[in-house]
Image (cartoon, helix red, strand yellow):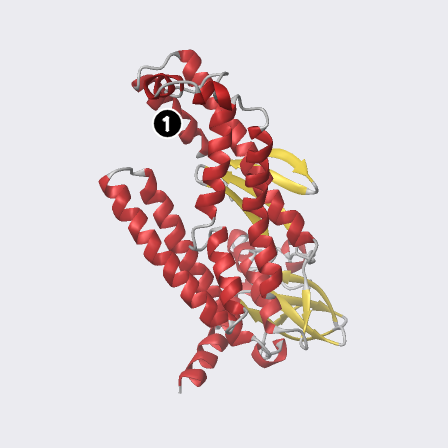
Amino acid sequence: MRGVLNLGKLFKVTIEIHWTFIFILAWIVFLELKSGGTLYNAVMSIVFILLLFVCVVMHEFGHILTARKFGVHTKKITLLPIGGVASMDTIPENPRQELLIALAGPVVNIGIAMILLLFVPVSFFFDQDPNQLENTLSHVTTQNLLIYLFSANIALAVFNFIPAFPMDGGRVLRAILAMKMDRVSATNIASGIGQFLALVFVIVGILYNPFLIIIGLFIYFGAYGENKMVRQLALLKGHKIGEAMLTNISILKPEDTIAHVIDLLLSGTEKNFVVVQNSDITGLLYHKDIIKNSKNKNLLVKDIMSKSFKSIDLHADLKDIFKLINTGKSDFFAVTNNDKLAGAIDLTNLTEFMLIQSNLITK
């Protein structure tokens, strides 16, 4: 994700904060000053937001460390104005595992809230009449900071339990349903509920609070994306790379010129190429690198090809290549058989295979 500040690593997971996070801080300061608060109140509000997002990071690590027990790794957490997003390699298809991973985040928030409650002067707040209490809680101060954090963690736990993808509650619902039915049907029901609730958020947001519109859209497209991905994975289940790979491909040599590559590019439909020397794959030449260097016709393939690439065995599962493509690692792979080039596979061909499979199922 572009426009992020790297905050460092924890448990081998990179923590990033998106530049739009500045907006929520500016918005909080604006609301504080507009409501009659002082500069001190504005600073305390910022402190509260920062501490709250520490709790959000801990929430995400609840998911991450639980997922790690099931062999699922996470490379980074990105903090956004609407919360944190953990970039997990995948979500286990085992309903029990997914249930435990989904529950772990809100459980962390409840745990934080219970710890904070030990330090909150509850009697101080209960001894006040309603008017005094309203005045005490009207602005964030050092005196009420802990009660604000306690309430916020309870709110985070409750909010995340709403049965709407991509929030934890949606995954909990899907996991429970998947124990009784197939994963595709479970996802369809859970995402449908999520999209309905998202529309409710948008409508309420239009009437009362514009921030709810952003949350609603996030939920809607998250639910839609999850449903689409699960359906696509179901179409690929049980199929191997060899069933969908490209076999009629142009093979380049390291000494070929860009002029030759451009001729191949314009005369056919291929965009990316495999580079081979002495029957061994030595690199991949991607479309973006061809275009970038197209002015220098005498440039050799070996000078611009990517030597850092991943080959896929033709007996591997198609869903594995789908996951690799969806993580953004690449959209073109060389396919091998006994470590020798057998073909290639890209996103276009994979999409065509899924369309054919979908048509076969519907007939």
Q: Residue at x 22, y 41 (%)?
A: 207
Q: Is residue 301 left or right of residue 234?
A: right
The quadrant holding residue 320 is bottom right
Q: Residue at x 54, y 24 (%)?
A: 120
Number of marks in the rendered image? 1
The outermost residue toward the bottom is 363
Q: Is residue 174 above or below residue 267?
A: above
Callout 1 amino acid: Trp
Foreground residue among 256 and 84: 84
Q: Where is residue 84 in the image (x, y as percent from the top left)?
A: 51, 42
At numbered mark 1, what does the secondary structure look like: helix, strand or loop? helix
Q: Position of residue 350 (x, y in %)?
A: 52, 72
Q: Can residue 122 be seen in this view?
A: yes
Q: In this view, does 319 lie to the left or right of 352?
A: right
Foreground residue among 290 and 26: 26
Foreground residue among 332 and 160: 160
Q: Name the residue under label 1.
A: 27
Q: Is residue 73 visible?
A: no
Badge 1 local density, few (<14 within 10 Å), some, or many (20+)?
few
Q: Residue at x 47, y 50 (%)?
A: 161
Q: Position of residue 41 (x, y in %)?
A: 42, 16
Q: Position of residue 245 (x, y in %)?
A: 58, 76
Q: Is residue 219 above or below residue 325?
A: above
Foreground residue among 287 and 135: 135
The outermost residue toward the left is 207
Q: Which residue is drawn at 49% across and 16% down?
A: 143
Quarter occupied by the C terminus: bottom left
Q: In this view, does 209 lie above or below 143?
A: below
Q: In this view, does 281 lie to the left or right of 205?
A: right
